Amino acid sequence: MASLTRKQEKHKHVDMTPYVNIETGETLASELKDTKVEITEDSESVVITSDNYTVIDSEAMIYLTQHLNRSELGAVSIISADLRTPLNIVYNNTVPHTNETLQELLGMASNSTFNLLIKKLMKLGVLYQIKGYIMGKIRVIYMMNPFVARKRKQFDEKVVNLFREFKMIK
């Protein structure tokens, strides 16, 4: 689904106690018991909604800018666009990315450059590698640290326990 935009509205609650019926002298609040009045006005704000988004944590990104070069940061950004499941697995359409498909996605011709990047991201705690009998054959797949990037709010508790949060030391 594409992004949707809609004009945001301001809602104001009207206090009915100061208003009085001139003919009867009763307050509007007593005549309209259990009624709430709300005025809606257009605002200068617009709401953008999308069901395909990635949240990238600002503190984690600041930390990563101190430890990764621009090319490596770009790779993290590209990888974060393909996260799925409560395990925050890096996906290739309907199946998890393998080393080969992830290397292709990142446009890296050299295996050694790709392997160095993956090792660096794992050492920093950005990626976690899982190797095993997955989807009918031995494969390597990756989970991304949800404290770096995520596409959902709820995760399997084990995932959160695998990774550390990136907090800036003040």
Image: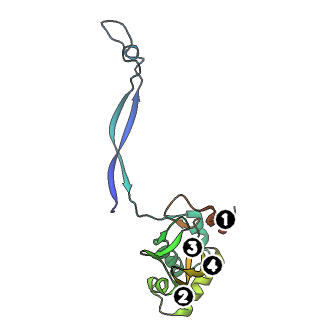
* Dot 2 and dot 3 residues touching (CB under 8 Å): no
Which residue has dot 3 on it?
Answer: 143
Is residue 60 at least partly visible in the picture?
Answer: yes
The answer to which quarter of the image holds residue 60 is: bottom right
Crowd tier of the residue under label 2, counting other residues whose Cα lies within 10 Å: few below 14, some 14–19, many 20 or above: some
Q: Position of residue 138 (x, y in %)?
A: 56, 85
Crowd tier of the residue under label 4, counting other residues whose Cα lies within 10 Å: few below 14, some 14–19, many 20 or above: some
Residue 160 vs residue 70, the one in the foreground: 160
Q: How far is mark 2 from mark 4, CA to CA?
A: 12 Å
Q: How far is mark 1 from mark 3, CA to CA?
A: 13 Å
Question: Could you tell me the amino acid type at mark 1?
Answer: Asn
Q: Quadrant of the C terminus?
A: bottom right
Direction front: furthest residue: 136
Q: How far is mark 1 from mark 2, CA to CA?
A: 27 Å
Q: Position of residue 66 (x, y in %)?
A: 61, 74
Q: Which mark is residue 122?
A: 4
Residue 15 vs residue 125, the one in the foreground: 125
Which residue has dot 1 on it?
Answer: 161
- SS for dot 4: helix
* Dot 1 and dot 3 residues touching (CB under 8 Å): no
The residue at the point 53 percent across, 67 percent down is 149
Q: Quadrant of the N terminus?
A: bottom left
| Earlier-in-chain disc, 1 versus 2 | 2
